[in-house]
Image: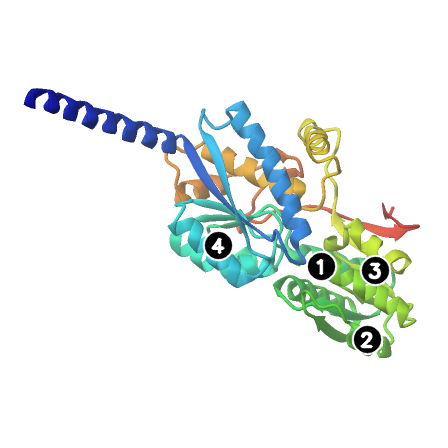
Amino acid sequence: MKKTWIIIGVIVVILAIILIVTQTKKEEDVIKIGAILPLTGSAAIWGENAKMGMEIALEEINENGEIKGRKIELIFEDSQSDPSRAVSALQKLISNDGVQVVIGDIASSSVLAMAPIAEKAKVVLLSPGASNPDISHAGEYIFRNWQSDALEGEINARYAYEKLGYKRISILYVNNAYGAGLKTVFERIFNNLGGTILIKETFEQGAIDFRTQIAKISRSKPDAIFMPGYPPEMALILKQSKEMGIKVKFLSVQAFDDTKIIEVAKDASEGVIFSIPKPPDTSETTVSKFIQNYRKKYKREPGVCSDTGYDALKIIVWALNRISEVSGPAIKDELVKLKNFQGAAGITTFDTNGDVIKPFVFKTVNNGKMIELK
């Protein structure tokens, strides 16, 4: 009887060992990647777009065995584009989930807040939407496959002064790192060209009444108003400006490229001119396949950050396929080598600061539609 219990005990131990080994093997076969995005709040449209693009990439990667037979697990966290929430999410992903690489955030202020933590932990942070110029020098583990405001702000200033002939401009911008970065670059370049910035007014993200700022700017009598912000607030600014009888032209940035602005502002959005990165060549296989799959899965066209969200995950997989052990330092060392990566958003090459440089074009609202200016 005693011998029987010994045999049973040995079997139990063996089964436990097998279970542990099997579970460990399963965990080793899964690579966890964090994703911190604004999934609620006024910047949620871009966070959701990026998330949907990433989910398409995830399906392709796991179904096609793109990473040496291993699977990718995405762990999404909602930052609400709030720096403090983004920091808490990053700490959770590092401490609890053990991730070595995180995609996010869309909001520049969140990326800047997370950067010191990612640097200290040696965890890669790849943003598919943050644009503040300070991110260029936020650390060696900080990357983005999105253009810097330093580029977009300069292009807007030159277009306003040289192409449109505006010499006196007032600025109305969202009071965070995103808006401030664009404002600073635009102001510096516009002044250097010989133009004059008459007045600068801010508004808070989530605000709904902008009449005080609009009235102040109107009294400055500008040739145009430069307005970097987010769709919900910009739509209301245009609507309230029209209600107040303001007829000054508005200039904006890529964030304006959202048809929901037209739905809210209606004809108050007519004539607004805004910049966007030059769209990728839709005849290129990767681009056309992404658009086709996106339409099939979500029954709509890709939005702002959909393609860069898709590319961010694909770029990380590109790096993972070139390393033997998954670690932040190893991933970082591969990303700095990335050149001419063909993705859904076009070609991506990282410079020494982990930034990308892309050409821009301008669009305007005409008869309720956003069309490219020639």
Distance between the alpha carbons at the discs numbered 4 and 2: 38 Å
Q: Which residue is mark 1?
A: 230
In this view, the mark in front (3 or 1): 1
Q: How many marks?
A: 4
In this view, the mark in front (4 or 2): 4
In this view, the mark in front (2 or 1): 1
Q: Which residue is mark 3?
A: 162
Q: Are marks 2 and 3 in contact (CB under 8 Å)?
A: no
In this view, the mark in front (2 or 3): 2
Identify the residue at horizontal 24%, vertical 25% (top origin): 15
Sequence order check, earlier mark of 2 and 1 = 2
Q: Residue furthest front?
A: 1
Tell me if 256 is positioned left or right of 267 in this view: left
State the image coordinates of residue 363 (x, y, percent, origin top left): 83, 50
Identify the residue at horizontal 75%, vertical 37% (top origin): 300
State the image coordinates of residue 126 (x, y, percent, origin top left): 53, 47
Instruction: Inspect the image, locate mark 3, and give the three-letter code of the amino acid beneath it.
Output: Glu
Q: Are marks 2 and 1 in contact (CB under 8 Å)?
A: no
Q: Which residue is mark 2?
A: 217
- Of 317 and 205, nearer the camera is 205
- Dot 1: element: loop
Instruction: Inspect the image, locate mark 1, and give the three-letter code of the amino acid beneath it.
Output: Tyr
For the N terminus, which image quadrant?
Answer: top left
- Determine crowd level at label 4: few under 14, some 14-19, many 20+ residues with C-alpha closer than 10 A: many
Sequence order check, earlier mark of 2 and 3 = 3
